[in-house]
Image (spheres, rainbow, N blue to C red):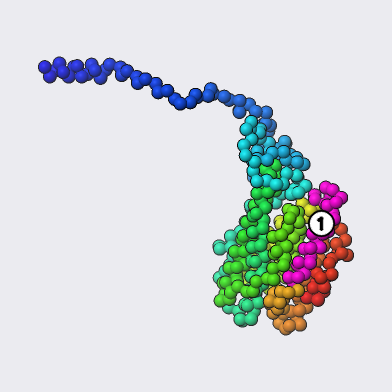
Amino acid sequence: MAETETKSEEQAEQQPQQAAPAQQLPFQIPPLDMSWAKVPTERPPKPIIGDDGFTLRLADAKSYGWAPDHWPYMNDTPRGSWPADDMGLPAPYTIYDKFEVWADNCADLYETAIKEQWKPATEIAWTTIEPLPDHVEAALDQIYSNISEQAYNSNQSLMGRLKDISYGYHEVKLYLATQTFDHARHVEAFRKRALSNNGGLGVQTPGFFNRAVYASFKFTEWVIYVNIIRTTFLLGLCEFGEKLARSQADRQLFDLLASDLRRHLAYGVEHLKVYVNHAPSHRSHVKNWLDRGEVMMAADLRRDKPLREAMILAFGETVADGKAKLAEVRQTQLKLYTKALEAATVYKRDEHIVHALRQVVEQP
């Protein structure tokens, strides 16, 4: 009897299970469609990778590297891709014309910036900083606080502008992302230096130039304030970094700051060249922005007594020596500024510097 029951169970297991009735789906599955794989986008040949690696310029070959004068899409359509049938919601872009942001060197500046990133926490020789007389340390800390504050203003204002630039000019956005990070690194590094040697942060700037940066209406106006005026004045100070430095760490900070700033200036010069040569009326816009920026820079320099006195103390063994060196710094800053404008095809600006700035340079 038991054997019979066992055989019955085995036979039952061997019988095919009857499939459950198919469940009716509440929607219809669309047929397989491979048309997306046949869109007429360009298929460039495989790139030949050289010593510089697979660079952005190498990737954007042929039509992928062509940035049109006007970008027609309001959403995130990548340049060179096939637009979707349903374009979806528009992105927050407000800049669709090339002349408003373009510089031919953006792709190369992006690659350089990526290669030259530096890490303040580990790449600065912080342990080389030794105790200094209180008045010298206080003077240096005031200068470092000023640099950090300027970088913070540049960083904050640039971050808010990246969303305005449409996808058609991705080289510009990628480069500017590195500049944003550069500014953040400068905030960090010079703030750390002011706090590294039993000193502390100094006095806030008068803030006239900072407010001009925040209040700029047009992107090119912002570039003039940050990448041309502020950058040349900071580069002028970096040229005297060896005179200010009291340690290997100080020298590294000024050298690395200058290296980053030279990229910022290179973008500013090339973009300004594109802008002024796009239409005759743009030169009058640039003149007005330069006038305003110079007035605001002069207002800061004239009223920033803590920075002026700190530079005199840091530069000279005597007050007279410090004043003479400060005058030399101001002349160097103005010269770098006018040379940058000349490179951007804004000629003879040295003959039209606003009186307030010329006065503060000649009588610092």
Within 10 Å of disc 1 (Cα), the crowding (few <14, some 14-19, many 20+) is some
- The residue carrying mark 1 is 286
On whether residue 288 falls in the magenta region, the answer is yes
Q: Position of residue 264 (x, y in %)?
A: 71, 57
Q: Nearer the viewer, residue 200 or 294?
A: 294
Residue at figure coordinates x 50%, y 24% from the top left:
29
Three-letter residue code for mark 1: Val
Q: Position of residue 34 (x, y in %)?
A: 58, 25
Q: Secondary structure at mark 1?
A: helix
Q: Position of residue 217 (x, y in %)?
A: 73, 55
Q: Quadrant of the N terminus?
A: top left
Q: Is residue 80 left or right of residue 126?
A: right
Q: Quadrant of the C terminus?
A: bottom right
Q: Nearer the viewer, residue 234 or 162?
A: 162
Would you place residue 22 above or below residue 134 in this image? Answer: above
Q: Can I make out residue 30 in this image? A: yes
Q: Position of residue 54 (x, y in %)?
A: 64, 43
On whether residue 115 falls in the magenta region, the answer is no
Residue at figure coordinates x 48%, y 26% from the top left:
27
> What range of the chain is rendered magenta?
274-301
Main secondary-structure element of the magenta-colored stretch = helix
